[in-house]
């Protein structure tokens, strides 16, 4: 699953920002190598929300979550985890999970 997410993100980056496929690996430092910049993060976040049906909030917009394709795919996996949805549900109804205090 992670590999499929990485491929979709990689294809999006290459198509949208005119990047050669061989320039990108899962751990390529996108921001440090100036492949993308902070302005691109909004369009990448919008793509991730649409493509993977996740909701990114302000706290997710940390640059480290977008520093590599691997980091972006990890963010998607965290957001699509069944535990994430259960935790969000509990938070909304005011329920505190044991061990989370």
Image (tube, grey):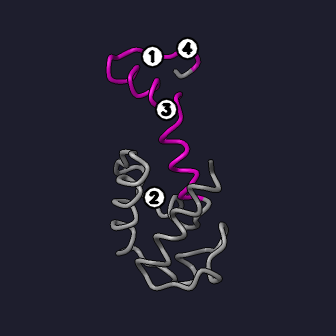
Q: Viewer-nearest of labels 2 and 3?
A: 3
Residue positioned 37% across, 61% down in the render: 47
Which of the two marks, 1 or 3, is nearer to us in this view? 3
N-terminal label among 2 and 1? 2
Q: CA distance from mark 1 to mark 3?
A: 14 Å
Q: Secondary structure at mark 2?
A: loop
Would you say 6 lies left or right of 47 here?
A: right
What residue is disc 1 on? Answer: 96
Q: Earlier in the sequence, mark 1 or mark 3?
A: 3
Q: Residues within 10 Å of mark 1 (few under 14, many from 20)?
A: few
Mark 4 to mark 3: distance in Å? Answer: 15 Å
For mark 3, give the secondary structure. Answer: helix
The answer to if 58 sits in the magenta stretch is no
Q: Residues within 10 Å of mark 3 (few under 14, many from 20)?
A: few
Q: Is residue 13 above or below residue 55?
A: below
Residues at discs 1 and 4 in contact (Cβ within 8 Å): yes
């Amino acid at each position: 699953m992670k590999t499929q997410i990485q491929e979709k993100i990689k294809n999006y980056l290459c198509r949208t920002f005119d990047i050669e496929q061989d320039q990108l690996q899962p751990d390529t430092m996108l921001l440090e190598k100036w492949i993308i910049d902070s302005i691109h993060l909004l369009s990448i976040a919008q793509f991730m929300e649409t493509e993977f049906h996740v909701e990114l909030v302000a706290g997710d917009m940390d640059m480290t979550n977008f520093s590599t394709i691997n980091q972006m795919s990890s963010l998607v996996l965290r957001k699509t985890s069944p535990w994430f949805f259960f935790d969000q549900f509990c938070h909304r109804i005011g329920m505190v999970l044991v061990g989370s205090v």
